[in-house]
Image (spheres, coloured by chain):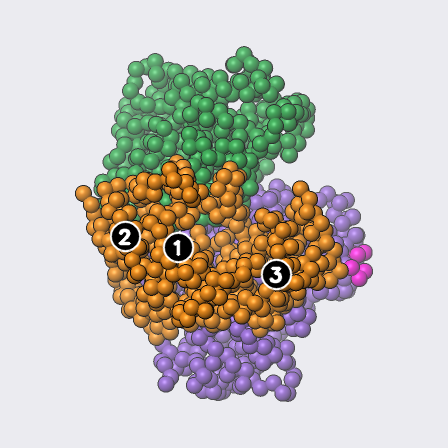
Chain colours: A green, B purple, C orange
């Protein structure tokens, strides 16, 4: 027996009727605002080529580490789900989908379940729930629709009401797809963001070779400190010319440094030299270079106006065997305790009081919200708080974020929502969750007479639309 | 004036009427499911001998460190409550009970209060509240009933609907009581669990002598690394033959190690040698041996199928004077900040991807729920999350557990409830609290349209009964 | 268009009607209880001289770092708000007030907003909300009223129903204002508290010179360990004679130490010697002296009965440039992760079991509530938990405090509310928030049948009035 799939119009609103009524009204005023997506991982090639997506499994299962990590945690081999099976003729995407469908109950209570149900119901118009009995119906419906023009990337971009979306590229990227989009005359606004980890982090795969590529791209000698910094400036300018308004830094920690010119040069020389050896740079040197580069990037931001995003605290590729076999981004990144107070001080000592500088802080360590992040953002003019991130991009995660940051940092030191996703089809679902949760939170404040209803209405607009545009200078 | 003691049928359900109605219905479907108690500290001798318990004070006050720690914190000497007074003819249990009764208001808002009220009302049928005025009535009623056959351990076991209960024993235990239970022909299922701390932790009282005893018991040379490991294998096999399906590890930290054979042998040699001296093993060596032994235990679990439980993060016997005078487990164990991400990596590097291995993680550091534990359990096939534990085995603690783990790990990487108690009479009360809180949480999800009502009904059964049986292979 | 300012009688009560009804009734029973303010930073000179306060900006904006830190975080220069402008004839307080008024929306959802609205509505009788359009009306109304007798310090003290208030003074303070108050015959009870940081913390500005002053004041040789301790004893006795019932210790960490007499003497000698040099004492020595002094202070408290308050975990003056320019207490103190379990052990090993000793612990690290502080306070007779503090002195912060401490420590190991403020006019607002939140929390427990209604009524009185008087021996 199949069960009906229906998205309830009151979903995610607090249950208490008077609060729900307020939330419903606030939400109605923001539900159809355009989507501003300042930080994500969609592929610009999609919008450049505008080709149809593949089958259901290739689009929704294989690339979504939120989904396959849960299945893997319950004993399903990643190979059977299509991970690392590109070009393997023996791989059966329909069978993989069935493995997922029969285990869909594992996602009860997770945001993936909500996002996927939205995609199934709203994007594809499916009216029954996913389970073993409806697996093939799902696979066929989705795969068939994906072959139609209405499901090409640009059509979805427009249907989804996306005002602007940012992708994320390495300094080594040619941005050819962004160029193609511009050349095509299509009006969709797709911008890039500058993510220099591959040439900033000595522990990144291929760091040494990446420096050579950066030298070639820029005509600078990136094995010297001054050439290396000049190369960054050139690539940042190029990225900005392709619409970038921000940089993004995914370091293990939030550590910053404030070395003298001579110290920085010496450090860089050591790191470059050791990067050529089998052992690579020492952990300490790698950490110190990353730390110093955050401060250098802040200095460059003061010049070129790019907003900095700092995303620390993930132990990348924690599962050694999975990394060996399948590579990065396979659901095995695990958050770590993260300090901000000591870590950011060197950078803040230099530039913390510059109102022209804008740094958006993210965390995977919620214990820092009320203790460190809200107090920092509620004082330093250059700091803002990014939304609940990654594992915390969820109803409960967002509620904790608001409850733990608002009283010290206020709403106006936060920057609205970003989806941070490569799962393009789910983008409206993600923004919708954020809008519902924020409206629910505001409704609680109104119901407890902590703010007025007209203030909540203003805030709902700000949180859904205005703040993100201001914060990212979009 | 005495006040009435009545357990409200809606207790612990959320107050909002529509949510409460859902919670009530879910709870009705699980309230009378059998109790599966996979981890606890009841005494197998109770079920072997089936003798009556003593008086109210001896049963409910003296052994319950949750209770006497609170009284001690408010200035009542432990001696006056009977702690360490075994065999002291001057000790007056009725007077001790009165000290407790007159301070029963101290427990307002605590789980002990809820568990005790259940015991008073449901187990003993008392209809007035405990206070100074009813102290003697309580003492007499309880003491009198405890002398009756209906309050013998086996009768309570049956009346309580316990399907299976696990006790916890050291490898040095002969398991004679478990043997007696089996020999007696009684149908109650009481199994053991393998808790090797006394022979694994060089800082445990009597560690060196314990190794000798282990040698005697097994015929292995436990002063050699290979003999020591072989002895563990033998005792694990013996415990499994007496019904054990799990091991339990109460280390200060979650540190694991992955030493080479030669390194492990050398470490063990050093630890054994220093264990004979007055200073004992160094802190570092002790920590490393415990760490290595978790990995060794995981290897053995892969062979014999015992489920591992890791319970880290308690600073045992924090109060030096109380420990000196009264010994272990006197309410002076204090939780510490606990890292899992770095600590578990050596073990996970070896066995993390083995679907045949099952490791249940507990924590006293709630900041690890959303940051570390849910992400780990939501990826590694061998990991599951134990329920809110010890100080967090409480309504608010359970709510935080579900709110902080479900979105990343789902429900199916958790293992249901365990009571972890030596307070036998309160076992149904503890499971009842867990069932009520879980049903309330599910009801909130239904009311917010995050799951369907029929899903909540399935989950309620799973959380109350199915998951614990599967997770503990019972 | 101006909007009406009205304080809703149900503000801060939970929205669910049945819970709200209970909260309302509980609150009605405590709303007008006298205010006991055992820890704050009002200036005793106010009550001694009883002069009128200045203008709106001087009273409500310039000294309130909660307020100007938020404005500064959004780009308003501190100078423009009057910070550090004492005596600058070019500074225009009305213009500063306008900067604040036009940005009052930044405070939505913060406690400052609630406290200020109370001051505006209740203290000054203003009936429209603060915004750009009402800025001058506010400035004039407030400034005018402040010039009247009804707004002199003693009149407000009486109108506010303050039973007793404690200020905080350094051992170097002559307490002349306290003496004046006593001499004046006014019946208001204003007591001092002993805050020895300036002569205990080698990193405090002027530490070495402070020791000389202490020597002069006491006739002891404060450069010798024994003279230094004797001087503390003398000053404590003097403070006690001026009404002090407590000491207060604002250390960076909660570290305590238990050095031998010889070790302590040697440490003190080293610290004093290095305090005279340009480098000052080493970090380690400074930390160790602070740690040892907490234990020494506990020993003295056992003798003279003063209650100890420990307020650790703030990184003071995090913003180097702001500190250089404007000095201490300018909104740039940022909380840090704080350990209590290891840190307090040396002190607790000495005096932890002394029921005559009373130590009240505060934290800025909420992750310690359930993990460390509630378990410690729920065991050690000398420990009590101070209320949610500083950044956490807020509705959500107070709720987290109760939810995370009550189940392990109970209510009776907490000490009621203190306002910790120099913003004298807002004191009733702060106590009112605490009373409302506590009543709301109790109402939830009643609605969930976790306590009885008559128990909640007793607890409401205890939390609002009785506990603080007992805990501070007032």
What's the residue at 54%, 69% (across, down)?
A: C240
- Marks 2 and 3: CB-CB under 8 Å? no
Q: CA distance from mark 3 to mark 1?
A: 30 Å
**Which mark, by number, is residue C217?**
3
> Is residue B300 something one can see in this rendering?
no
Residue that badge 2 annotates: C144
* Same chain, labels 1 and 2: yes
Q: CA distance from mark 2 to mark 3?
A: 42 Å
* Residue B351 relative to residue B138: left or right: right
Along the viewing direction, whichever of A348 and B431 lies nearer the viewer: A348
**Which mark, by number, is residue C423?**
1
The magenta span reads B272-279
What is the x, y in percent for residue B325? Answer: 67, 73
* Residue C474 relative to residue A215: left or right: left
Q: CA distance from mark 1 to mark 2?
A: 19 Å
The subunit carrying tag 1 is: C
Q: Is A416 colored magenta in this rendering?
A: no
Label 2: how many Cα within 10 Å (few below 14, some 14–19, many 20+): some
What's the residue at 65%, 73% (across, down)?
A: B326
Q: Earlier in the sequence, mark 2 or mark 3?
A: 2
What is the x, y in percent for residue A60? Answer: 39, 33
Q: Using the image, determine if residue B301 lies above or below residue C413.
A: above
What's the residue at 27%, 32% (across, down)?
A: A34
Label 3: how many Cα within 10 Å (few below 14, some 14–19, many 20+): some
Along the viewing direction, whichever of B157 and C235 lies nearer the viewer: C235
């Amino acid at each position: 027996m199949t069960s009906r799939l229906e998205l309830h119009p009151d979903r995610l609103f607090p249950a208490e009727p008077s609060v729900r009524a307020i939330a419903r009204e606030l939400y109605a005023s923001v539900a159809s605002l355009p989507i501003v997506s300042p930080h994500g991982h969609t592929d610009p090639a999609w919008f450049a080529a505008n080709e149809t997506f593949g089958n259901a499994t290739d689009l929704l299962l294989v690339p979504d580490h939120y989904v396959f990590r849960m299945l893997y945690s319950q004993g399903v081999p990643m190979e059977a789900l299509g991970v690392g099976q590109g070009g393997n003729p023996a791989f059966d995407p329909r069978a993989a989908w069935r493995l997922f469908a029969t285990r869909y109950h594992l996602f009860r209570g997770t945001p993936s379940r909500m996002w996927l149900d939205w995609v199934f119901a709203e994007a594809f118009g499916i009216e029954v729930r996913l389970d073993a009995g409806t697996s093939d119906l799902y696979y066929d419906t989705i795969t068939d629709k994906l072959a139609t023009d209405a499901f090409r990337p640009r059509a979805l971009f427009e249907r989804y009401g996306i005002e602007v979306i940012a992708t994320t590229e390495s300094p080594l990227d040619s941005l050819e797809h962004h160029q193609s989009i511009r050349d095509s005359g299509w009006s969709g606004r797709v911008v890039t963001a500058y993510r220099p980890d591959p040439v900033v982090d000595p522990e990144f795969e291929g760091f040494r070779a990446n420096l050579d590529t950066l030298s070639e791209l820029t005509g600078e000698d990136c094995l010297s400190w001054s050439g290396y910094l000049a190369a960054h400036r050139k690539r940042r300018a190029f990225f900005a010319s392709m619409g970038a308004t921000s940089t993004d830094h995914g370091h293990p920690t939030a550590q910053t440094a404030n070395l003298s010119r001579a110290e920085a040069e010496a450090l860089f020389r050591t790191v470059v030299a050791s990067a050529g050896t089998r052992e690579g740079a020492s952990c300490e040197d790698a950490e110190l270079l990353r730390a110093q580069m955050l401060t250098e990037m802040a200095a460059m931001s003061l010049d070129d106006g790019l907003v900095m995003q700092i995303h620390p605290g993930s132990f990348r590729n924690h599962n050694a065997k999975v990394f060996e076999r399948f590579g990065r981004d396979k659901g095995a990144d695990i958050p770590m305790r993260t300090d901000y107070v000591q870590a950011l001080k060197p950078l803040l000592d230099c530039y913390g009081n510059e109102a022209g500088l804008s740094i958006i802080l993210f965390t995977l360590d919620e214990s820092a919200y009320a203790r460190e992040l809200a107090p920092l953002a509620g004082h330093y003019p250059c700091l803002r708080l990014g939304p609940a991130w990654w594992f915390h991009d969820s109803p409960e995660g967002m509620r904790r974020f608001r409850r733990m940051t608002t009283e010290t940092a206020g709403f106006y030191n936060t920057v609205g929502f970003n989806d941070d996703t490569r799962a393009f089809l789910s983008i409206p679902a993600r923004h919708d969750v954020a809008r519902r949760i924020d409206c629910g939170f505001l409704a609680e404040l109104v119901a407890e007479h902590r703010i007025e209803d007209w203030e909540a209405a203003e805030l709902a607009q700000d949180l859904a639309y205005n703040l993100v545009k201001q914060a990212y200078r979009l």
